[in-house]
Image (spheres, helix red, strand yellow):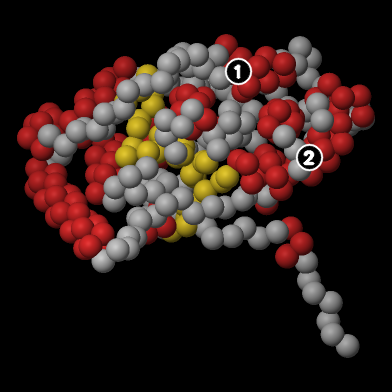
Amino acid sequence: MSKGKFKLLCIHAAVVFLYSTGKVIALDTFIVVNQFRAATPTLSPLTGLFFRTLTFLEHGIKPVFVFDGKPPGEKKAVVRHKPASSLQTKECLQLLKYLGVPVIQAPGDAEALCAQLVREGTVHAVASEDMDTLPFGANILIRQLNAKKDSEVIEYSLPKLLEKLQIGHKEFVDLCILLGCDYCKKIPGLGPKRALTLIQKHRTIEDVVLHINRKTHPVPNMWKYREARKIFLDGPQSSAPELIWTEPNEEALVEFLCHTKRIKEERIRNRMVKFRMMRENKREEREKEKAEGGGKQTCIKDFFRVTRKRVSPTSNRKRPKSK
């Protein structure tokens, strides 16, 4: 994700509030683990994964963790992608199994499969820092659902974003390629505003390159934009998974995290006690609200800060002084 594309999407972000009780969220496991490693480098990312997963579950949110498969060859040529080690993957799989949450092995990039799960209605949203999830077709993307307590959670609605940009999904894919993606190089010097204007007017990369100055915006040699476009539009070939959630196995968690990974048993036991209490309190609240004929859903913003609005480019301009 280039800075230009990130800036463009932030400016035009269509923020929605995802009422999430009982809903399913897909997560790119590699990104989640790296977030915890960056936020708490002295602690095992397994600790963060344990605490974050329980937070989801006790608020009635059902997480699905997706693991990367073999990345496309085009990605290897552009991004220095450091895959998770087999030991790290094995340990994460083991932990998530004991937590009772489903995991899926993607045939390729995890974000591509996450987006497909949203399109098919298997999950309601994707939580990822990789904004390439949007050109893959994820209707709802949640960003900054990470390890930092002061993070602002941002939710993007792809349909509303396309409406604001006044382009379709295919044009959006071409726009993202122009601004830089993981699968091919970008056109140097082409900024987000100019790229959007060109796509709105000419609709395809093929027509855009006919209307730019090749000296100031040289097209990369052997530019694989068609291959990148195909990756985004075709998506992975996989059947809909069966998702099953079970109760966390506390004794197995203690054995693995405390006796094998040397995490303090008191921390794990205390968190499990809190988890059971929270679940019971939520259950009682739902029963009470049901009896009263109402109901309140837990929203992402109930336990993470949510960005309510984005500042438009014009709002930063100085207002003229009144005479």
197 on left or right of 14: right
- 273 to 137, vertically: above or below: below
Q: Earlier in the sequence, mark 1 or mark 2?
A: 2
Residue visible at 10% across and 31% down? 252
The amino acid type of the residue labelled 2 equals: Leu
Residue visible at 9% across and 43% down? 265
209 on left or right of 257: right
Marks 1 and 2 sit apart, C-alpha to C-alpha, by 23 Å
Residue visible at 87% across and 36% down? 201
- 48 to 186, vertically: above or below: below
Residue 117 at what x, y percent from top left?
Answer: 46, 28
- In the orientation shown, which residue stands out farthest toward the bottom? 323
Query: To which quarter of the image does residue 5 belong?
Result: top right
Pointer 2 local density, CA inside 10 Å: few below 14, some 14–19, many at least 20: many
Q: Nearer the viewer, mark 1 or mark 2?
A: 1
Residue to which mark 1 is pinned: 234
The amino acid type of the residue labelled 1 equals: Asp
Q: Secondary structure at mark 2?
A: helix
Query: To which quarter of the image does residue 39 belong?
Result: top left
Whether residue 269 is visible to the viewer of this picture, yes or no, is yes
55 on left or right of 166: left
Q: Secondary structure at mark 1?
A: helix
Residue 319 at what x, y percent from top left?
Answer: 80, 74
16 on left or right of 262: right
Residue to which mark 2 is pinned: 196
Quadrant showing the N terminus: top right
Residue 299 at what x, y percent from top left?
Answer: 39, 55
Residue visible at 14% across and 47% down? 272
Whether residue 41 is visible to the viewer of this picture, yes or no, is no
Residue 243 at what x, y percent from top left?
Answer: 31, 27
